[in-house]
């Protein structure tokens, strides 16, 4: 008798659509069915599901989900079902409309995405909102924040690993000079952060530490209450160690009085297919608790189940 196991049946896109349609019809919504399908499909599969669903049932899947679901569960399912570039455009637009000096979402999108991903998000923004991301960022922000955020969201950095060490040394010196003088909104400081490749910035910051003894973010902590300094530190973290930035965002979302579901939903929905493994490792290292256990302790119901499906996304 053969010991080979029979491969499990992989549902077709049409079958997924049929099951999702069933989840919306009949007595009440079958949230478990929605999670079992959408929580376990990658971006290309979700895109196909949306196309076939619209062709088969004459309705956009997002509209069907919007009608049937509510609250945090609805938000995470809708964000997750969007294509990554559409999702970034939607989140960026929401961030411009609700912008305050403590809102770091625009910076997060601009600095943690690859150059190509940011470009696709900007194109998706044009298509959806009939305006550019940079014009909305400029219109809704002000002062030093506008001076930093507009070039960040407009940037198309070099994405390769090549580094100029001579330049790294001279720009590390330049950054140190400006920070020593508390010239945090200096044109050159912003130019370096907004235009250099991530590899080049990393090399510059290593030079900074070797030459001047401190991590640059330590020197940018002169006033812990200064929100412009906070966004500068966030920019640097997002460019050189995004997993540390996202770990902190999740930790703060879970640990605050009453969970910050907005931040938790955003980070899980945007990172599940990209950096979740290293974010989970970082979380475990920093908090001595696995991320799934922390989420299970702090959330409930279908929202909890969807979060847990997504943080395990792509793992066997």
Image (spheres, rainbow, N blue to C red):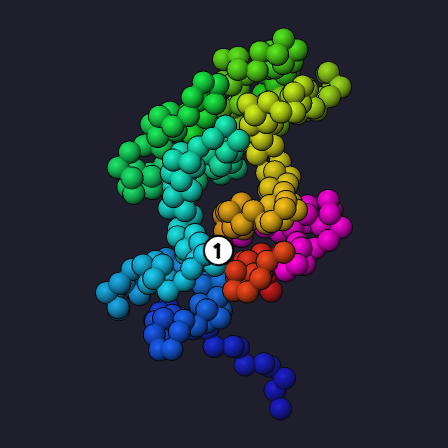
Measured as percent of width and height from the top left, residue 157 is found at 46, 28
Residue 273 is inside the magenta segment:
yes
Which residue in the protein does label 1 denote? 72
Asked if residue 236 lies left or right of residue 151, the reply is right
Q: Secondary structure at mark 1?
A: helix
Q: Position of residue 28 (x, y in %)?
A: 40, 74
User: Relative to residue 204, is residue 104 depicted above or below?
Assistant: below
Given residues 21 and 5, the one toward you in this image is 21
Q: Is residue 166 left or right of residue 154?
A: right
The answer to which quarter of the image holds residue 143 is top left
What residue sits 55% from the left and 65% below the top? 301
Which of these two is toward me, 70 or 273? 70
Q: Residue at x 41, y 62 (%)?
A: 69
- Residue at image point 38% right, 28% down: 140
Give the class, few, some or many, for how many residues have Cα within 10 Å of label 1's Cα (few <14, many ≥20).
some
Q: Nearer the viewer, residue 125 or 158?
A: 125
Q: Position of residue 214 (x, y in %)?
A: 73, 21
- Quarter holding the C terminus is bottom right
Question: Does the image show residue 166?
Answer: no
- The picture quadrant where one finds residue 209 is top right
Q: Position of residue 194 (x, y in %)?
A: 49, 24
* Relative to 191, residue 43 above or below: below
- The answer to whether 152 is drawn above or below residue 279 in the figure is above
Residue at 48% of width from left, 55% of height from top? 72
Q: Does residue 265 appear in the picture of this structure?
A: yes
Which span is picked out in magenta?
272-297
């Amino acid at each position: 008798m053969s010991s080979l196991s029979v491969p499990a049946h992989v549902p077709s896109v049409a079958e997924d659509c049929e099951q999702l349609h069933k989840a919306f019809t009949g007595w009440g919504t079958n949230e478990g069915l929605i999670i079992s399908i959408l929580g376990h499909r990658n971006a290309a599969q979700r895109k196909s599901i949306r196309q076939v669903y619209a062709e088969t049932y004459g309705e956009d899947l997002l509209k069907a989900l919007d009608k049937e679901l509510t609250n945090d569960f609805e938000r995470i399912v809708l964000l997750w079902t969007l294509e990554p570039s559409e999702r970034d455009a939607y989140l960026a637009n929401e961030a411009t409309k609700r912008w305050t000096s403590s809102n770091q979402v625009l910076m997060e999108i601009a600095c943690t995405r690859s150059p190509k991903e940011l470009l696709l998000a900007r194109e998706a923004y044009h298509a959806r909102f009939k305006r550019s991301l940079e014009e909305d960022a400029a219109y809704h922000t002000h002062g030093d924040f506008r001076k930093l955020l507009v070039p960040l969201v407009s940037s198309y950095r070099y994405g390769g690993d090549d580094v100029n060490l001579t330049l790294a040394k001279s720009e590390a010196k330049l950054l140190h000079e400006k920070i020593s003088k508390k010239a945090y909104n200096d044109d050159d400081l912003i130019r370096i952060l907004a235009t250099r490749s991530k590899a080049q910035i990393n090399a510059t910051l290593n030079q900074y530490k070797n030459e001047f003894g401190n991590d640059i973010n330590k020197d940018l902590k002169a006033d812990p209450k200064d929100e412009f300094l906070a966004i500068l530190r966030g920019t640097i973290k997002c460019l050189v160690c995004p997993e540390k930035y996202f770990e902190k965002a999740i930790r703060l979302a879970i640990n605050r009085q009453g969970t910050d579901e907005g931040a938790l939903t955003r980070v899980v929905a945007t990172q599940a297919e990209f950096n979740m493994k290293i974010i989970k490792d970082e979380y475990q290292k920093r908090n001595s608790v696995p991320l799934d256990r922390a989420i299970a302790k702090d959330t409930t119901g279908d929202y909890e189940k969807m979060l847990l499906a997504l943080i395990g996304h792509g793992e066997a």
